[in-house]
């Protein structure tokens, strides 16, 4: 990506942005896009290798290894954020995990809690420390990553779907709470996204049903009106718009970027 080809919106240059799980997948696509727009970025991730790779590609990128479900890690991340960026204009709550695949009677309480801890509680832990910084900046933006599973029931993926429904409630509640402080809060709902995580989900479900990977992939795409996967860059483009001048009056919305997922 180049700055010349991707400066399609105004108002992002100079913004101080924190992206969780920003060293790979959707998070890295967001970082790459915002970097091209001139934003000042910090990303966290649980993979040191991914962080090093991202730092080598994006000049001036600040990085830190952190698990968003761990309060101490989150506190340490915000301490470094304050020391390096000096403030915050936008928080992208992107971190999440796929969680277990299985019937509700087969899912362990430990796996249930881990999925909700990362996908939902992690957003709370980051947001509670981000809000005072956003207020100090005079306002800003919070973008929470939900999922098509946040509006459709998702059999055999109950922890993930429950967490992502929770993200939408969290988003709409925060938009009302923080609006008077000029803090916009929105959720993005990806659908079937190209990448390693979705490939793993397809693999696990195919194994459970006793069919091939390609057969399972076809079943997923039959439920998408456009009959194709979306890409991490699609999410990044929406994030850029929401942070831009064009998104200055958008708040409390759950924006599906999914080719119209009809059901799961």
Image (cartoon, rainbow, N blue to C red):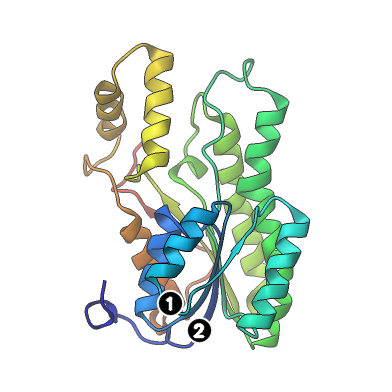
In the orientation shown, which residue stands out farthest toward the right?
Answer: 72
The residue tagged with tag 2: helix, strand or loop?
loop
For image coordinates 25% across by 31% down, the residue present is 222
- In the image, is residue 237 above or below residue 208? below
Q: Nearer the viewer, residue 144 or 67?
A: 67
Determine whether, in the image, residue 54 is placed left or right of residue 233.
Answer: right
- Quarter residue 225 falls in: top left
Tally of numbered discs: 2
Q: Residues within 10 Å of mark 1 (few under 14, many from 20)?
A: some
Residue 131, percent across and down? 70, 73
Q: Nearer the viewer, residue 52 or 199?
A: 52
Q: Is residue 201 visible?
A: yes
Residue 208, percent across and down? 43, 15
For image coordinates 31% across by 31% down, the residue present is 220
Mark linked to residue 157? none
- In the image, is residue 195 above or below residue 84? above
- In the image, is residue 175 above or below residue 227? below
- Quarter residue 20 falls in: bottom right
Determine whether, in the image, residue 183 is placed left or right of residue 32.
Answer: right
Mark linked to residue 15? 2
Mark linked to residue 247? 1
For image coordinates 70% across by 71% down, the residue present is 78
Determine whether, in the image, residue 165 is placed left or right of residue 113.
Answer: left
The residue tagged with tag 1: helix, strand or loop?
helix
Determine whether, in the image, residue 2 is placed left or right of residue 143.
Answer: left
* Residue contact between numbered discs 1 and 2, judged by CB atoms under 8 Å: no
Residue 3, percent across and down? 28, 81
């Amino acid at each position: 990506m180049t700055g010349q080809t991707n400066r399609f919106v105004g108002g992002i240059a100079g913004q101080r942005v924190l992206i969780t799980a920003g060293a790979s997948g959707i998070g890295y696509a967001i970082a790459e896009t915002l970097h091209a727009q001139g934003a000042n970025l910090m990303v966290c991730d649980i993979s040191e290798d991914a962080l090093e790779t991202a730092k080598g590609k994006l000049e001036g990128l600040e990085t830190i290894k952190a698990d968003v479900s761990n309060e101490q890690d989150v506190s340490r991340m915000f301490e470094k954020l304050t020391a390096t960026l000096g403030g915050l204009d936008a928080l992208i709550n992107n971190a999440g995990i796929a969680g277990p695949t299985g019937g509700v009677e087969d899912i362990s309480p430990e796996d249930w809690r881990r999925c909700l801890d990362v996908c939902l509680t992690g957003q709370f832990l980051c947001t509670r420390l981000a809000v005072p910084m956003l207020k100090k900046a005079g306002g800003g933006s919070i973008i929470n990553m939900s999922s098509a599973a946040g509006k459709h029931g998702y059999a055999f993926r109950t922890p993930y779907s429950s967490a992502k429904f929770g993200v939408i409630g969290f988003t709409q509640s925060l938009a009302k709470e923080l609006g008077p402080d000029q803090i916009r809060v929105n959720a993005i709902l990806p659908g079937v996204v190209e990448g390693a995580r979705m490939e793993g989900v397809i693999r696990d479900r195919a194994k459970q049903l006793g069919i091939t990977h390609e057969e399972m992939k076809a079943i997923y795409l039959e439920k998408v009106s456009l009959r194709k996967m979306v890409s991490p860059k699609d999410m990044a483009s929406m994030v850029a718009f929401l942070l831009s001048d064009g998104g200055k009056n958008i708040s409390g919305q759950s924006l599906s970027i999914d080719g119209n997922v009809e059901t799961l």
